[in-house]
Amino acid sequence: MKLSTEPYWQYLLRDVLELYQSGSAGGSAKIRSHMAEVRRLLGKVIDDDPAVQEEEGEELPVCVHLDRALSNAVGYRTARLARSIEGVREHLHWKYGYEKVPRGLTRKYGYAEILGPTGPVVSDRIILGLVLFGPKTTYPGHSHKGLTESYVCISGHTSENDVGVYAPGSLILNPPGHYHRITTADREPCLLAYAWTGARESLVHQKMTFSRK
Ligand SMILES: [Fe+2]
């Protein structure tokens, strides 16, 4: 299957692109240039008309929060993306990424890839995915070697390194090697989209495994 014949995957990618187009960089030159880079790469991916490997999805315990997380996006500028996630939901493959899942995360965390070297939309230009957290979750500190990461909050509220609270539509930039630890609000789940950019080499070899500090 090709992206051009799979409207829901197209909608999903275009809705992510739209958030990187219309969102404010808050006056940060670094964030502005990362957003431009994501737009450039995602535009190329769409032009490439890459393969879509649509497999049967797989859920994790945290997926009990997905309905709530998606409906909590209503009224925010991330609502369209939340709706397009619904369109591919049955094909999302939720994973832990850790060989040994940290205690406390088994029911409260999972990520699903959207675009990357291993699919579902196959490209080695950029990696896009979703991270879902249950309420009151602490995601242990980690950093990503050779990759620039951004999180866009789709729904819920999150804090990173105890220095700010991010609401739906907010973007957080984590430069390569930047150590970050995430917490989520007490009563509601939190759904983030992430984008990873970097050398193709780093993208191909990157896994959701973390170099702890
Ligand atoms: Fe991260």
Image (tube, rainbow, N blue to C red):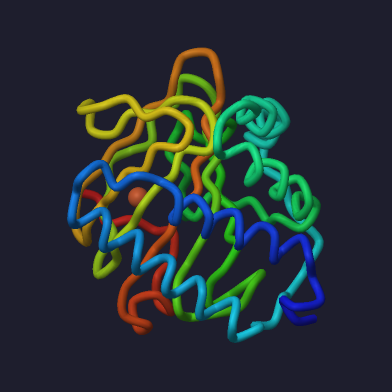
- Image height check: is 49 above or below 128? below
Q: Nearer the viewer, residue 18 or 52?
A: 18
x, y percent for residue 126 = 45, 72
- Image height check: is 60 above or below 10? above
Task: Tell whether 203 sits left or right of 84.
Answer: left
The residue lying at 35 percent from left, 69 percent from top is: 37
Q: Nearer the viewer, residue 9 or 114?
A: 9
Task: Tell whether 27 sits left or right of 21.
Answer: left
The residue lying at 67 percent from left, 35 percent from top is: 61
Number of numbered labels in the structure image: 0
User: Which quadrant: the N terminus?
Assistant: bottom right
x, y percent for residue 163 = 20, 28
* Residue 49 in which image quadrant: bottom right
x, y percent for residue 67 = 72, 31
The residue lying at 64 percent from left, 72 percent from top is: 121
x, y percent for residue 120 = 66, 69
Q: Nearer the viewer, residue 96 or 37?
A: 37
The residue lying at 47 percent from left, 67 percent from top is: 127
- Image height check: is 122 above or below 211? below
- Image height check: is 120 above or below 99? below
